[in-house]
Amino acid sequence: LVHKERHSSEIKQICLWLGGDFITGYIHEELEESNHLSPTQATRFAKEKIITAIKFYLEYGKFDRIIIPCNFGNHGRTNKKPRVSTGYKNSYEWMMYNDIADYFSDNKKVQFIIPSGMFAYADLMGYTIRFFHGDSIGYGGGIGGLTIPLIKALQRYDQQQHAYYNFMGHFHQLWQATKN
């Protein structure tokens, strides 16, 4: 797709968001028996696939820069209950992202953004973009679904740091809203 779009546009950089939930840890007791891979095995498997993808983009993508914002998900935590202030310290994915960043540390084309909190911010083409996993947004199946709590949360987040776009993956659905 990038090569196709380059016929009409100049594309020098790519943003590869690693949004979390690359593994399913033992966050529920039954997963200790039913998971195909243990959390450590799954982390190693995901790490190998992500490194392969980044190498592919470096070799064939002809990009000057690859920006990689990273968010840990709720499935890759080391404990059964989510942690807020120490979530990153208890995440297989956060560890994996840092290992991958170490792997590419000598390559100046690759820039990792690995926060110790909920948000990763990137400046892309002059716009501040917020990336977050989204498991902190709850709606309890209410009328209107995710929309109302998400809009309220984004307004709160913008009070801390404004973002022109938000990318969230936890709910596995596309929802686009425009700002006035």
Image (cartoon, grey):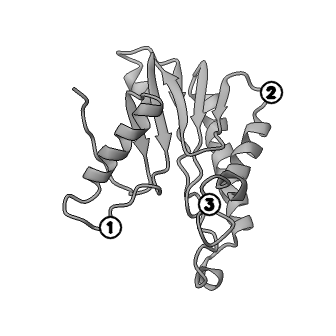
Mark 1: secondary structure: loop
From this view, report whether residue 21 is shown above or below residue 160. below
For mark 3, what is the residue?
Answer: 83
**Viewer-nearest of labels 1 and 2?**
1
92 sits to left or right of 179: right
Q: Residue at x 75, y 34 (%)?
A: 104
Mark nearer the N terminus (2 vs 3) = 3
Q: Residue at x 33, y 61 (%)?
A: 139
Question: What separation in Å lies between label 2 and label 3 (alpha carbons)?
Answer: 33 Å
Q: Please tell me in which quadrant of the rendered image residue 74 appears.
A: bottom right
Mark 2: secondary structure: loop
164 sits to left or right of 44: left
Question: What separation in Å lies between label 1 and label 2 (alpha carbons)?
Answer: 45 Å
Name the spot of residue 2 as percent of width and height, x first. 44, 28
Q: Please tell me in which quadrant of the rendered image residue 153 appears.
A: top left
Q: Please tell me in which quadrant of the rendered image residue 75 appears.
A: bottom right
Name the spot of residue 69 as percent of width and height, x first. 57, 36
Mark nearer the N terminus (1 vs 2) = 2
| Mark 3, other Cα within 10 Å: few <14 / some 14–19 / many ≥20 | some
**What numbered label is drawn on residue 27?**
none
For mark 1, what is the residue?
Answer: 140
Q: Residue at x 38, y 23 (%)?
A: 5
| Mark 2, other Cα within 10 Å: few <14 / some 14–19 / many ≥20 | few
